[in-house]
Image: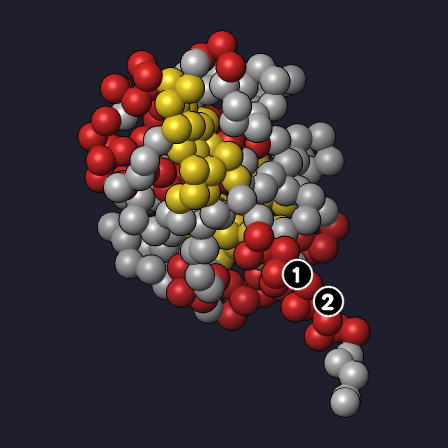
Amino acid sequence: MVKKPSWVIDKEKAKRASAAETVWLFGLHAVRDALMNQNRVRLRLVVTRNAADKLADAIAAAGMTPEIEDPRHFSAPLDPGSVHQGAALEVKPLDWGRLEDLALAEGSGAPRLVLLDRVSDPHNVGAILRSAEVFGAQAVLAPARHSAPETGALAKTASGALERQPYLRVPNLGNAIETLKDMGYTVLGLDGDATMELADAAKGLTARPVALVLGAEGPGLRERTRALCDHLVRIPAAGAFGSLNVSNAAAVSLYAVTRP
């Protein structure tokens, strides 16, 4: 029998691990939206009687049989301190498909993407997903490593946006940027030390596909990421020490590149 190459074995192991991975979502909004999402693979629903009453329509639509539990003995394996509001749902992570397809998805205007370079805080990513949905971005991209995975905390902060707004984790962010540039995207990297202001860069891009790249607070963009951007731009601050966290910067940037 021919022995499989090690890279084939590793790939098969990763595929099996991905297939086995599950996520526990929690909180009334996150659980309701996941129950209503036909693309979600739902496995187990744990609720208190009060939460079951509040989610009755969504539970019926999903066709699930919930496990009713005493709020004092809530068995779902959540992190201590999680504000679950009496509702937790075990699901498979969403599969958003290929970057090339998402990047060409139709919207109300020219395509817009948000790329996150090592943004690992799930609360920041959840807030960015909400902004991306509000401003009609085609997707939010992040590297598979050193970024926030799909978790209950991220879903709760996203307040339902995780079920509707594509969040695609790619093997290599730099390669994804190169793919987008080949597809005609203009790539703008947010950098507080850049000389060009975001509004000035956005003026001539109304009808062109644009990808916004934001780095983690503190380290910012990695060297290769910076080098691959078409322009480095900054959001001007009124004061000498003014700055925005990454989720607020994403919202401001999306507004700047989507307004007429």
- SS state under label 1: helix
Determine which residue is flagged by label 1. Answer: 14
Tell me residue 172's x, y (percent).
Answer: 65, 59
Residue at image location 40% in from the left, 59% down from the top: 102
Tell me residue 103's x, y (percent).
Answer: 41, 60
Q: Confirm or deny contact between disc 1 and disc 2 (CB under 8 A).
A: yes
Residue 174 lies left or right of residue 125; in this view the side is right
Tell me residue 84's x, y (percent).
Answer: 46, 20
Q: Is residue 181 shown above or below 4?
A: above
Front residue of 70/254: it is 70
- Which quadrant, please, contains the C terminus? top left
Residue at image location 51% in from the left, 14% down from the top: 73
Q: Characterize the local packing of mark 2: few (<14), some (14-19) or many (20 or more) Cα atoms within 10 angstroms.
A: few
Residue 170 lies left or right of residue 36; in this view the side is right
Front residue of 186/60: it is 60
Residue at image location 47% in from the left, 62% down from the top: 99
Tell me residue 57's x, y (percent).
Answer: 20, 30
Looking at the picture, which amino acid does disc 2 mark? Answer: Asp
Determine which residue is flagged by label 2. Answer: 10
Mark linked to residue 24? none
